Amino acid sequence: MKKLWGGRFEEPTDALIESLNNSLAFDSRFWRQDIAGSIAHATMLGTTGILAADESAQLVAGLHQLRDDLEAGTVALPPDAEDVHTAVEGLLKERLGAVAGKLHTARSRNDQVANDIRLYLRDECDVLETKLQEFQQTLLDIAEREMETILPGCTHLQHGQPVVLAHHLLAYFWMLDRDRERLADTRKRVNRLSLGAGALAGTGFPIDRHQVAELLGFEAVLENSMDSVADRDFLIEFLSFASILAMHLSRLAEEIIIWNTPEYGYILLDDAVTTGSSIMPQKKNPDVAELVRGKVGRVYGDLITLLTLMKGLPLTYNKDMQEDKEPVFDAIDTLNLVLPALQKTLATAQFKKERMLAAARGDFSTATDLADYLARQSLPFREAHEVVGKIVRYCIEQGITLEDLDAPTLSTFHPLLAVNTQNAQAALTLQYSVSARTSYGGTAPSAVRVQWENAKARLNNRA
Ligand code: ARG
């Protein structure tokens, strides 16, 4: 396919250099956005009188037809074109002849490519927003069922205090909620018009950038033509969002992997989301969760690639920036794969309430509750902590659990335990411990129900 810039050259480009230079292999992904941008540009060239009305109309009709034919597969982008912009313009020329050459009036590929990727990313932000909402809905559904399911709550992966499973899973709801906030905020800066910047300095033609922005649904027009063609912040912001989201998913994936081990046995993963081993017939591996955990590495890599790519680039456009696309596509593809995969893993998992409860029994995780009980009897918390520490040590020496302590023994540890000993014993039960944590955002089922309602309202309000 003929190049857009052959005029000043005597010799053809070396084949090896062409394979380095050409970007069609990856930028063909946004041919729809390239055509949409051209339709808006051609329309504006007509309304401003830069092109005659019939020329503008021919271009717009030709672009519509080309879009339909590409969509139907009756025509294809020529694989030897330098990039998607060249490919689209070349096909238009085959159809319309010389007038196709007027489409590029008052435009450069520098403002065009920035425009295309903004349109493309805006669409992808909306796809991801929907997938995030669906993931949150799954978390809400499971939380609703598991409002009273007790399991050990951990710090340092050591049993800390018992919590309910709904509380644990809703923690991920709020992580994804912040991801959605970041995505929406990123989208604002994606949704700005670069077209009309020309190569870098603007144009002498009487263009109307605001009209183009309106036609393409952009919220604003970028103020500086040099910034318009040189800015890739919006891609870096998107990859930051993607990295944080991927990190959240990897944390959940890791918990699923741990919970699925025979030692824990908190969940049983469905056959549809696990795989076997070629040598060990008994194996059922949590590959989905492992891949979600593993794929975070490439998303971080995509972010670092782009940060490194842009570092130190002088104004304005530099060809280095052609390398901005593949990391963004990779992050988008990865998220579009792992979000629904992990969601399915969760949605089809069986949660083993009895195993969770058994793990929380006898784990000394109600020790804080006994200390709180003594503190409520006006013993300074530090002293209460000391007393309960001695009780825990005694239990460990005797090989018994806190719940096993009989009233006479418990009474010996402190005068305050010698009165109303049955209340102190009650404080040591898991149900008491969980139900007592009624503070806002706490794990008591009554508080978790409030949290769940707030989460639900949040999901519905922003949907
Ligand atoms: N394929 C190029 C890119 O992705 C399009 C812009 C080319 N501009 C240029 N001045 N060579 O960045």
Image (tube, rainbow, N blue to C red):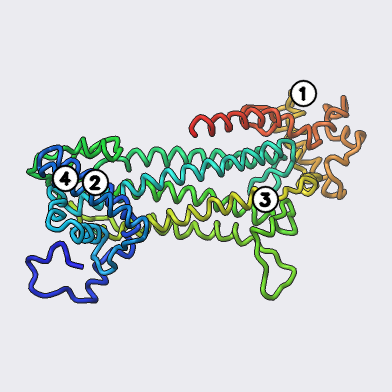
> Which kind of residue does numbered mark 4 sit on?
Ser
Q: Nearer the viewer, residue 242 or 98?
A: 98
Q: Which residue is mark 4?
A: 56
- Is 111 left, or right, of 169 in this rendering? left
**Which label number is shown at residue 407?**
none
In front: label 2 or label 1: 2
Q: Which residue is mark 3?
A: 348
Mark 3 vs mark 2, CA separation in Å: 46 Å
Residue at image coords 88%, 29%: 422
Label 2 packing within 10 angstroms: few (<14), some (14-19), many (20+): many
In front: label 3 or label 4: 4
Mark 4 vs mark 1, CA separation in Å: 85 Å
In front: label 4 or label 1: 4
- Is 450 left, or right, of 58 in this rendering? right
Q: Which residue is mark 2?
A: 39
Tell me which label, 2 or 1, sits earlier in the chain.
2
In front: label 2 or label 4: 4
Residue at image coords 43%, 55%: 331
Q: Which residue is mark 1?
A: 377
- Is 378 left, or right, of 92 in this rendering? right
